Amino acid sequence: MRYDQARWTDDGAEGDEGADERYEPLLTEKNSEEVEVDSPLPDDLTRDSLELPALEEPQLARHYTRLSQMNYGVDSGPYPLGSCTMKYNPKFTEDVAALPSAAVHPDRSERSVQGSLALMHGLQDYLARIGGMDAVSLQPPAGAAGEFTGILVAKAFHEANGEGDQRDEIIVPDSAHGTNFASAALAGYEVVELPSGDDGRVEVEALEAAASDRTALFMLTNPNTLGLFERDIEEIAEVVHDAGGLLYYDGANLNALLGQARPGDMGFDIMHYNVHKTFATPHGGGGPGAGPVGVVSDLAEFLPAPRIREAEQGGGYERFDPESTIGKVHGFQGNWLVLVKAYAYIARLGDEGLTDASAKAVLNANYLASQIEYEVPFEPFHHEFVASAGDQDAADVAKRMLDYGVHPPTTKWPEIVSEALMTEPTEIESRDTLDQLAEAFDAVAAEDDETLANAPNRTTAKRIDQTSAARNLRLSWQSLEAEE
Ligand SMILES: Cc1ncc(COP(=O)(O)O)c(C=O)c1O
């Protein structure tokens, strides 16, 4: 068992009674002074004075260090959130994104940002090759935004074929991520939920029954959220295409396939890449991320504008609007610095490195699953597995794992597995770390319900009201103060 977070408060006293004792005051609460504001802006837009913290550098450094120690992150330990893919973000990609030349204003002239355009053109190309797609847009800012964009592209395609009104359904398997259902509904489609077969995969007969001339799209994650490869993918593609629909690849699990197989070769027409999961940039707190969308050639004309191409007149690169573009889905090119990190990561790893990363992600998941007591009902899985907490409550298991110094897996989803513990150790973890994770799983598996229900005991915050935290966001202390 491991617990080593600093407990020193500002006056040097050690909080020894556990979580409730730990509290880090705001900088202004420590010491502040009123500073006069001399601003060139109009008087009615500015204040006369401002309360600012008045602290020495060591106090500041310790404040932020203490705050970071209250938290848990990929830099503190393993973070095996299934499907959400939290992996270590190599620091060299941060260095590249922090280069002064990466800080370009999006309104600068094309001629003065040729390096940035070359990078984006290169990334479009990398992603197209990795996914087996013909054209890529870098604009969408997250996987979910990529889904929505892909659906709009499919809609534009069907409309151009005179089938826009008729094709009003999108089929989504019951194991899919909630954003698939939400994106389809948001784009105005009827969502047809497809129950998984007994083996956790898509049942071709059930798909045949669901697909019709109303089908616009079938959205599929492969490997699916149970980590299972959809072995019948070629038949699935045939059924969807025979019905006149398109096949959408949710790229959240692409890090199981890099260099091994390509969605385009499996028959997918549209896909998004969660570059923040598969390549670099940690995924969390809602972003910032990037969810580029790739399509086969028939759909390229509908992609968001602008895209990047080699300049038609002379050398270099230029932005262009695809012929029948659906328009913009984000300002300028999307989350530029996230794209820089993705480019740097792919360029550094190369073909072999990416293939190796996938192989290790699959190996690590299989090793970890083989070391834990909890049952894993669906096999053979790839880069993630879904264990069942059995009689225990998966949410309690998760809270208790925090006491063992490791982050828990994703819980209670997919619902096909009761009390699901969806686990994705990723390629970055060493065997020692996987063993440490397995020990935590097994220790919690042996504990009684009361212990679990009272966990966590060793974290800064105990149980928070997660629903209110999500639905009633207070993103600054000012909003809290205003309410009070
Ligand atoms: C299977 C799957 N699809 C889509 C998404 C949505 O991706 P994003 O969080 O980038 O919006 C996720 C997120 O974790 C996911 O796991």
Image (cartoon, grey):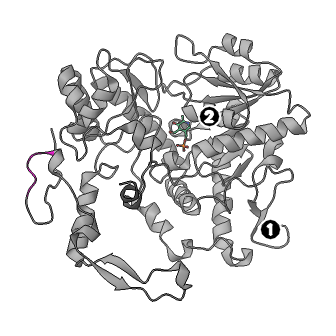
- In primary-sequence order, the first of circles 1 and 2 is 2
Q: Quadrant of residue 434?
A: top left
Which stretch appears magenta? 14-18
| Quarter of the rendering occupied by the C terminus | bottom left
State the mark number for residue 391.
none
What x and y, as percent, mark residue 155?
79, 37
Residue at the (21%, 72%) spot, across then down: 59
Taking the image as shown, residue 225 lies to the left or right of residue 375, namely right
Residue 134 percent location from the top left of the image? 75, 46
Looking at the picture, which amino acid does disc 1 mark?
Ala
Question: Residue 17 magenta-drawn?
Answer: yes
Q: Which residue is mark 1?
A: 311
- Label 1 close to label 2 by CB (< 8 Å): no
Position of 58 relative to 349 (above/below) = below
Element carrying mark 1: loop
**SS under mark 2:** helix
Kindly identify the amino acid type of the residue bearing the numbered disc 2.
Ala
Rendering coords of residue 347 (x, y %)? 54, 57
